[in-house]
Image: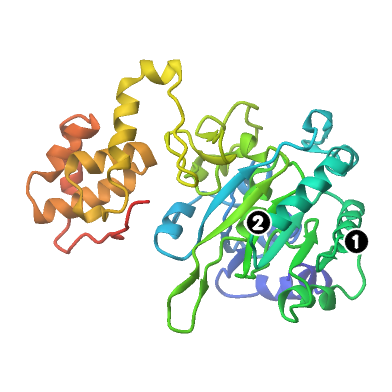
Amino acid sequence: MAQTLTRRPLIIQQLAALEFPPLIIVDEAHIGTPSKIIRQLISASNPYILGFTATPDARVAKHLPELYNSCVVCCQVDELIQQGFLCSYQHLARTKADTDILEMRNGEFTEASQQAAFGTSAVYDGILDDLRTTPFSKCMIFVASIKHASEMNARLREEGFASLEYHSKMENGAYELAKFTELNLANICVSVASLTKGFDLPQVDLVILNRATTSLPLYLQMIGRGSRPVWSSNGTREKTHFRVLDYGGNWERHGLYFEDREWDKMWETTKRAKKSEGIGTVSLCENCESIISASQRICPWCGHERPLTEKELEQGELIEVTSHYTRLVGRRISELTPGELAVYAKIKKKQPFAARVARAQEQLRKGFLEAFTAAMGYRPGWADHQRKMIGASRVEFEDITLV
């Protein structure tokens, strides 16, 4: 741990005495706590540093472009969902909190203003109603302060729920958390920040955001607590989806959990995005309050069909692409024609992955690349460039089923 190295400076001297540069691997690299000790290691031994994180956003983690030379995006959340490593989810909007009274300081909403917004009777009543009507196995409720966590837990227990609170200031924290994770004495855990990262309990299938945040990494980390699948002893998945109840309007600031994000650009962009950025890709289903992709006119959760807006009526091409994609759902990507693969790439913003599929299909069906190039609207030279990337061996890709 970074704290251990801080207390044992001789370890740094020993690393500096090595005949070759050490390799330092940093988990949860977006966390700034070990930055000071990493700087000391860089100064002492000029090491190779490899950092892993699901949320390399330099607007929040300003140390990233200082400590790392580049960002390699290995995969996105949607890819992990398609491959079965994570679960998809339903994001439900809740509007019982008065977020207009939130005050910001140092780039984040203050605890006092969050207490005022999310500690009202209306919010408590809404959460209680949701917990009574929403089926769940394990639920995590995230709040913004220890005081709010204690009040929320007390209210839940008064109403007969088996809940507990967990935060950094409590005594016997390990035992309290075990009531939720192993002893099955509680199925609701109210937390502040301690469990937003590095906590893995696959049985969590309901996440309640009873707070607001300007931090995209924090938002994704909180939702991610419900994303782990549950497997049965015979290898089948018992949990394929989870739910998020968003009382803080966080979806309007940050979009959906499984959206592809340009992490390779965000890891070195330290300026805050404008308030309006990042919210154009999602919309609210008027019938069931689910947050869905703006490209979906039919809600996948309740079947409600959203009427076209004036702007959409003017964008006939977009509407046509959207309707074409709906007909592709349930098919494997290897079955798609070049035109259908282009529809997938445009709607899902999966151009690099679609290009890989097109290269693989070119090995089986000559002319696939040219047809895909035309469907995407690329210049003819693009197909020639892609063909040069095809080697002697078979181009592999994950043959996903479209959802």
| For marks 2 and 1 on the same chain, the one whose residue lies earlier in the sequence | 2
Count of residue discs: 2
Tell me the quarter of the picture where residue 396 sits: bottom left
Residue 128 in view of the camera = yes
Q: Quadrant of the N terminus?
A: bottom right
Q: Single out the residue that lies furthest toward the left.
A: 366
**Other residues around mark 1 within 10 Å, as few (<14) / some (14–19) / many (≥20):** few
Residue 35 in view of the camera = no
Of residues 382 and 338, which is closer to you in this image? 338
Residue 159 x, y percent position in the rendering: 86, 60
State whether residue 16 is above or below residue 327: below
Q: Callout 1: helix, strand or loop? A: helix
Residue 304 x, y percent position in the rendering: 47, 37
State whether residue 274 is above or below residue 356: above
Residue shown at the point (56%, 40%) measured from the top left: 291
Residue shown at the point (40%, 63%) measured from the top left: 83
Of residues 265 and 55, which is closer to you in this image? 55
Residue 19 x, y percent position in the rendering: 57, 75
Colour scheme of the picture: rainbow
Q: Amino acid at mark 1?
A: Glu
* Residues at discs 2 and 1 in contact (Cβ within 8 Å): no
Residue shown at the point (73%, 75%) measured from the top left: 11
The residue where tag 2 is placed is 134
In the image, which disc is placed on residue 158?
1
Q: Callout 2: helix, strand or loop? A: loop
